[in-house]
Amino acid sequence: MTTRSANSSTAPIKRPRTIQIDSNGRLRHFIAIEGLSKSILTEILDTAESFVSVTAQNVKKVPLLRGRTICNLFFEPSTRTRTTFELAAKRLSADVLNINISASSSSKGETLLDMLRNLEAMHTDMFVVRHSSSGAAQFIASKVAPHISVINAGDGSHEHPTQAMLDMFTIRQHKPDFSSLRVAIVGDLMHSRVARSQIHALNTLGVGELRVVAPRTLIPVGMERLGVQIYQNLEQGIRDVDVIIMLRLQNERMHGAFIPSEQEYFQLYGLTEKRIALAKPDVLVMHPGPINRGVEMDSAVADGEHSVILQQVSNGIAVRMAAMSMTMRSRADAEGEA
Amino acid sequence: MTTRSANSSTAPIKRPRTIQIDSNGRLRHFIAIEGLSKSILTEILDTAESFVSVTAQNVKKVPLLRGRTICNLFFEPSTRTRTTFELAAKRLSADVLNINISASSSSKGETLLDMLRNLEAMHTDMFVVRHSSSGAAQFIASKVAPHISVINAGDGSHEHPTQAMLDMFTIRQHKPDFSSLRVAIVGDLMHSRVARSQIHALNTLGVGELRVVAPRTLIPVGMERLGVQIYQNLEQGIRDVDVIIMLRLQNERMHGAFIPSEQEYFQLYGLTEKRIALAKPDVLVMHPGPINRGVEMDSAVADGEHSVILQQVSNGIAVRMAAMSMTMRSRADAEGEA
Amino acid sequence: MTTRSANSSTAPIKRPRTIQIDSNGRLRHFIAIEGLSKSILTEILDTAESFVSVTAQNVKKVPLLRGRTICNLFFEPSTRTRTTFELAAKRLSADVLNINISASSSSKGETLLDMLRNLEAMHTDMFVVRHSSSGAAQFIASKVAPHISVINAGDGSHEHPTQAMLDMFTIRQHKPDFSSLRVAIVGDLMHSRVARSQIHALNTLGVGELRVVAPRTLIPVGMERLGVQIYQNLEQGIRDVDVIIMLRLQNERMHGAFIPSEQEYFQLYGLTEKRIALAKPDVLVMHPGPINRGVEMDSAVADGEHSVILQQVSNGIAVRMAAMSMTMRSRADAEGEA
């Protein structure tokens, strides 16, 4: 279930690493956590830190990307994710172009590459890409003109790197030493691009111990090769952990019967206050949203003292501002050289 | 048909007054005209006055809300109303986020409160709410974080306060002394949130005499308790009035047979030049738009010398700028105190 | 197939010339190429020239239209065209309002004129109009308030003047002397508003020789009166030409069987590298996009050394900035006089 196998049906693609990092070792595109170094991930977190104050103040703007045009290319609708990228772009003073592909000229038979070439010719600076197919953002990054940066806003069941980094940011705010942490990721590992990104991020940042907890049907083959311990029992899986990351049941992406029923799922894998008591007393409870209350967790847990779910949302703006400004800085350097 | 009875099916809610006014007596949310004092209504009109020149000049911008994020939360589509709020926000230099709820993650089973909490966590500053259910804006105002202001852009058949205030503004431009005015509101009182807001506004501003004119089927039970005189005959109802406010036949909100036919309605309640002659020679003719020409009024009336319908639209921007800047000033004061 | 006959079913309208040019001889609306002088067309090209550098630099903004509101009135959806106008407006620092008419209050029975009056009352400054009916933009221009400019973004099978001017701009970049040029326009002349605009522009700019190439079914009656030579054979039509302008097969606008099949069309009229060899060695190949690869031309031609298709897209922003700023300058002059 590596990047390569997830994309096995498409033409062979360059390793993310080659594409994501420029010749100066800077982040040029942000497609996947896999392949990025600890120092790059840390730079993203540190840059986001500098933006947290911007987004909290009254005039929530910095002029870093003034006059730049950022294009949200959403092949799969997601109001929530688009909104966070749009806000991040506007707080960097960029112009935003929202393009919903199903509504666009793809119905006129235009190819994806022709559409990209056209947007490039209009001097857009960045594509934020959301797509239902794994590998789409990387494919686009491999094809764009040298002056364009691509950020993956979720591709199939592959990666969702900005979501993982906002999770890392939120963990670090509360528990800065990753090496001492025991983290459990709970839920639909099979369909979750977020989980894949989180596992790579936690491993790269040197997490102490990483567990995944799910019914056998929701654990992809080969998961153990990613350096995680697999639990099928929730109580055992979250015992003494510092962080519980709940995943969303991706009902809209489940094309088969992976779980018996939502009720039964909650009984076995739903997070309750009683179960949280098994973890560390200061355990953090995280969820990428939107929450299915009563399925993945009790409302009391979602709104409880351990929950940092809304901090995740808030940090999401700063992390996206960081990804945007870093990839643009890479390009500005390149322009300086040329 | 007061606010309370209109919301009888929902949980008991605080009176608008408590929610709308902050501890310094300033407008914190703008949910309903009912419960607001004459001095607040007058402050809205005076503030709007100061914005009229802004919207007419070439560079139609003031930096009052620069860096603030205003979120149009439209649970009921309305291009026209959204457009006026969007223009008002942009002319105050705010960033605007348009969220159409039917198209958003509500389809993913997210609760309304979770959606609000998420938008709050993204550091939005204001929700402009349009909803088909009476009480929705007030419910949201009762739940939002302390740093957020809510403006009601129309909730069910309850209120549409900015529309009423732009009507008051337009009347005051032409006839500044409300106490000497005789005003008739004509048409579908039953389904009109605008009418309810207008009646409260006119009463609070001390209108001389207030009449409503409609067939019995379109007058809600208990209307006379609002201090109006009820007429079923149009000729009698508009005799010697200073202002005629026509309401829109809300065909899209009529789920039954309230009127026999549009033709018959026009015969009995349609405004014609002949009928206008019964009113004062300088009578103002108003309509919230969009007009059903030939149903509520003749085209000659809509475009005639008495019509101030387009002035209403124009004043709508200034009044919305006033509501936005006043509610934000309330919040800024609160921040200063904290 | 002149403007008049294309609009024969509507009420008689003023000649475009009268409407487009103000009393100082300046461009006030931009509705059609037909009727504009060579000096106006040249002024558009020269003004666009001055904007090419703006759109290529990092901060792609000039403050020319700061605080102005430009309204995209799209009665016919077109993400691509709307996007280019939106980018052009933002690079001039204007505020942009996108109004998709099918989604707006037209469903509430509002008339077009009432909608225009409302948008005018909101102090918008410009309408960019796209409509499936020939004459729509001109009709709107004939009805708007004196402070509003109208730009035609495509009306039925009538004109698409900004597209034609970006084509002229692209030709002039490579081959500045129109009088020495032999140009062939190839394809669906019948349904193409672009072709009509191109023919008028090339004639007015004094092109040396102008050919159209199409099957008889796709050539409108009376085309020869526009000063073109008609070819039904592609090889003959493009022999020794300096520029080949391919048109898009407007499948979505063909309500009958004008061509036998796409395969057969390509065999007879598709541009291939072999056929290009018949033209001048430095021939330019143009297409308004989106391309139907394998129908109008081979992929090798679309992406080949003669293709200037992406330059057309890029120049489209600058040309639209020129049209917007010129029509607004006309209005500013009028305001200065008043």
Image (tube, coloured by chain):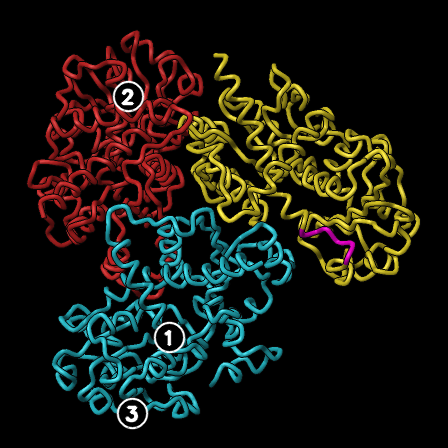
Chain colours: A red, B yellow, C cyan
The lab-note entry on whether marks 1 and 2 share a chain reads: no
The dot on residue C39 is 1
Q: Residue under mark 2: which chain is it in?
A: A
Q: Amino acid at mark 2?
A: Thr
| Among the two numbered marks 3 and 1 on one chain, the one whose residue lies closer to the N terminus | 1
The magenta segment: B305-310
The dot on residue A170 is 2
Residue A263 in sight: no
Circle 3 — which element? strand
The lab-note entry on whether marks 3 and 1 share a chain reads: yes
**Of A331 and C141, the residue lying toward us:** C141
Give the quarter of the figure containing the N terminus of chain A: top left
Is residue A200 shown left or right of residue B207? Answer: left
- The structure residue drawn at horizontal position 27% and vertical position 88%, both measured from the top left corner, is C209
Image position, residue A123 (x, y; %): 26, 53
Q: Amino acid at mark 1?
A: Ser
Residue C323 in sight: yes
The dot on residue C231 is 3
CA gap, disc 2 to disc 3? Answer: 68 Å
**Badge nearest the viewer, 3 or 1:** 1
